[in-house]
Amino acid sequence: MKYLLVLLVVGVGIWMLVKRLRSGGGSAGESPGVSERAAPVSMVECAHCGVHLPAADAVPEGSRVYCSEAHRRLGPSPTPPA
């Protein structure tokens, strides 16, 4: 029974070591895409409802941006979003 426990502890130790070497080693065997991260996206706030959305999806009008064409037509909110 004690040999089984020792074997289990050694097996878990080896598994953790292999896992750490694969993920944090930075070696050539690393899977593609791990080091390639997407650039952060610029977020803006809708002047009408206050929802945050990517700047690329926003509908601009002058210095304000809106989340949709309907909110652009309604204009800025009379009360600031909370």
Image (cartoon, helix red, strand yellow):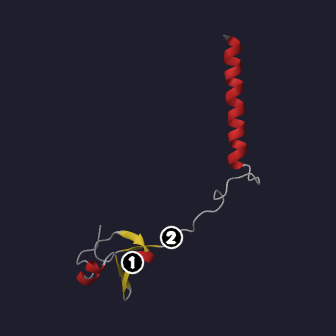
| Residue 67 in the figure: left or right of residue 1 | left
Residue located at (71% from left, 20% from top): 7
Amino acid type of the residue that numbered disc 2 sits on in the rendered structure:
Val
| Residue 46 in the figure: left or right of residue 41 | left
Q: Quadrant of residue 19?
A: top right
Name the residue furthest top.
1
- The reply to whether the C-beta atoms of the residues labelled 1 and 2 are less than 8 Å apart is no
> Where in the figure is residue 53, as x and y percent of width and height?
40, 70
> Where in the figure is residue 65, as x and y percent of width and height?
36, 80
> Where in the figure is residue 12, as x and y percent of width and height?
67, 29
Amino acid type of the residue that numbered disc 1 sits on in the rendered structure:
Ala
- Judged from the image, the secondary structure of the residue bearing numbered disc 1 is loop
Residue located at (76% from left, 52% from top): 27
State the separation of the CA atoms marked 1 and 2. Answer: 12 Å
Q: Residues within 10 Å of mark 2 (few under 14, many from 20)?
A: few
Quarter of the rendering occupied by the C terminus: bottom left
Residue located at (72% from left, 39% from top): 18
- Judged from the image, the secondary structure of the residue bearing numbered disc 2 is loop
Residue located at (28% from left, 72% from top): 49
Q: Quadrant of residue 52?
A: bottom left
Quarter of the rendering occupied by the N terminus: top right
In-front residue for pair 44/16: 16
Q: Earlier in the sequence, mark 1 or mark 2?
A: 2
Q: Is residue 54 above or below residue 76?
A: above
The residue that label 2 is drawn on is: 41
The residue that label 1 is drawn on is: 58
Q: Is residue 24 above or below residue 54?
A: above
Q: Quadrant of residue 72?
A: bottom left
Name the residue furthest right.
28
